[in-house]
Amino acid sequence: MANRRLKLSTPSEIRKALARVANMVLNEELDNKSAGTTIYAANIILSSIRTDEYGKKVEELEKRALIGVEEDDGLFDSIRKSIDPAQKGAANDER
């Protein structure tokens, strides 16, 4: 059997590779054990890609949250004053 290379860098490439492996098994070009090993490896790679993507999304959300906190410092003060009665009295004294 000839060596074959499968692209497994993106979820789309993995989907195409798995379809190719399934067709190879159906056409008896690849044995079940080799197909199972390939499918297992593809699933591990896909899982690591998803983990990386989730990590990037979390970092982006954290950055957005920090930027929002820095921009809205006055908002948190006004919320705190509306909740804390002692702060409310101080706010009324300032007026």
Image (tube, grey):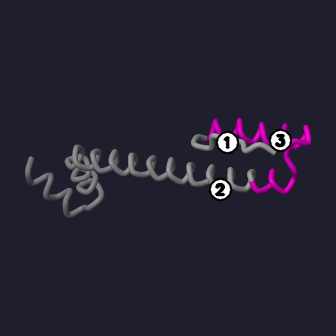
**Residue nearest the viewer, comparing 51 with 20:** 20
Indicate whether 40 appears above or below 53.
below
Segment colored magenta: 11-37
Q: Is residue 24 left or right of residue 85?
A: right
Dominant secondary structure of the residues highlighted in magenta in the image:
helix
Q: Assess whether residue 36 is covered by the magenta stretch.
A: yes
| Disc 2 + disc 1, Cβ < 8 Å | no
| Identity, as a three-letter code, of the amino acid under mark 2 | Ile
| Identity, as a three-letter code, of the amino acid under mark 3 | Ala
Residue tagged 3: 22
Closer to the N terminus: mark 1 or mark 3?
1
For the point 8% across and 51% down, the residue is 94
Q: Is residue 59 left or right of residue 91?
A: right
Helix, strand, or loop for circle 2?
helix
Residue tagged 2: 44
Q: Position of residue 5 (x, y in %)?
A: 67, 42
Query: For residue 5, which numbered disc appears in the image?
Result: 1
**Residue nearest the viewer, comparing 30 with 49:** 30
Closer to the N terminus: mark 2 or mark 3?
3
| Identity, as a three-letter code, of the amino acid under mark 1 | Arg
| Disc 1 + disc 3, Cβ < 8 Å | no
Q: Position of residue 7 (x, y in %)?
A: 63, 40
From mark 1 to mark 3, how far is it between C-alphas? 15 Å
Q: Position of residue 48 (x, y in %)?
A: 57, 54
Helix, strand, or loop for circle 3?
helix
